[in-house]
Amino acid sequence: MSLQIISIILGSLTLASALMVVLSKHPIRSVIYLVVTFFFITSMYIMMNAQFLAIVNMIVYAGAIMVLFLFVLMLLNLNKEMEPMNAKGAQIAAFIAGGSLFLVLITALKDTLILGQTYRQQDNSIGLVKELGNLLFTKYVVAFELTSILFIAAMVGAILLAKREKQIIE
Amino acid sequence: MQAASSIGTSLDFFLFVSFALFTIGAIGAMTRKNMIVLLMCIELMLNAVNLMLVTFSTYYGNGDAQIFVFFTMVVAAAEATVGLSIIIMAYRNLKSIDIDMYNKLKN
């Protein structure tokens, strides 16, 4: 019973920090709230016993990607509140569209079999590093190796895109 | 073991949180104008989908979805790198990351 209370608190904190990502004016505050959101999502992975994904989420997302966002924000030197908001009508339309999307998703959830189910205790070990490592290096080994090509392409592309033009050096 | 399985949180709660996160990310992608905040909203939507995949993976007792989440994180890392370098290049050209300044394809 106490686990349910903890999960409800965690879920509401997740949604509150995700709302603050969208609502806060300054981009740096958005990045900080996004890190907080990722920490709460990590706690949900831990509650579902997906330990490997929890660690990877914390290291890769909250660690690496968010630091990258912070570095880019620091490089861009956005010192003034330069972001004008959209028109009021467009904002209201966006909120109506998002709300109806949420309604459709919740209505689709209403009749599913998963409603009220707890996770099965007997195959609780699927999220551990051993099981996922077995799966990753046997069944999905080709995709895992192709990932390295993707990373090399992304690295070369990022360097080429962010490089300064040559005439500045001369 | 049976008593232990009855106190777990129900999985539709995680689905609800993931739907709400996706909606918040979509609303943010529609309302904000800063390009970096747009990229962050996309990351939020990706994380909502990851949470839903992990929930279904826990429900069916199948590890394939968690591998898929791992690859999603890999692709998201690459996407954030390239997207942020595109934003830096765009900022050098126009000195702004307002999304409304980049509507040259419209005309």
Image: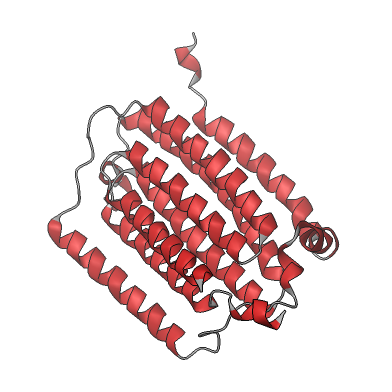
**Residue drawn at the location 44% of the way across and 34% of the way down:** A70
For image coordinates 42% across by 63% down, the residue present is A9
Q: Nearer the viewer, residue B86 or A68?
A: A68
Q: How many marks?
A: 0
Task: Name the residue located 54 percent from the left edge and 47 percent from the top edge.
Answer: B79
Q: Nearer the viewer, residue A88 or B89?
A: A88
- Asked whether the viewer can see residue B74, the reply is no
Q: Quadrant of residue A94?
A: bottom left
* Residue A86, position as x, y percentages in the image: 19, 52
Looking at the picture, how far across and down is residue B38, in whole percent? 37, 49
Instruction: Please tell me whether residue A51 is drawn above or below residue B104 in the rendered image.
Output: below
Q: Is residue B72 above or below residue B63?
A: above
Task: Identify the coloring.
Answer: secondary structure
Residue B10 position within the rendered picture, expressed as x and y whole percent measured from the top left: 53, 78
Residue farthest left in this picture: A88
| Residue shown at 30% from the left, 76% from the top | A100
Furthest residue in direction top, as rendered: A170
Whether residue A9 is visible: yes
Q: Would you say B76 lies left or right of B26 here?
A: right
**Quarter residue B64 falls in:** bottom right
Rendered view: A164 above or below A68? above
Q: Is residue A140 above or below residue A4?
A: above
Q: Position of residue A139 (x, y in %)?
A: 82, 66
Residue B31 lies left or right of residue A128; in this view the side is left
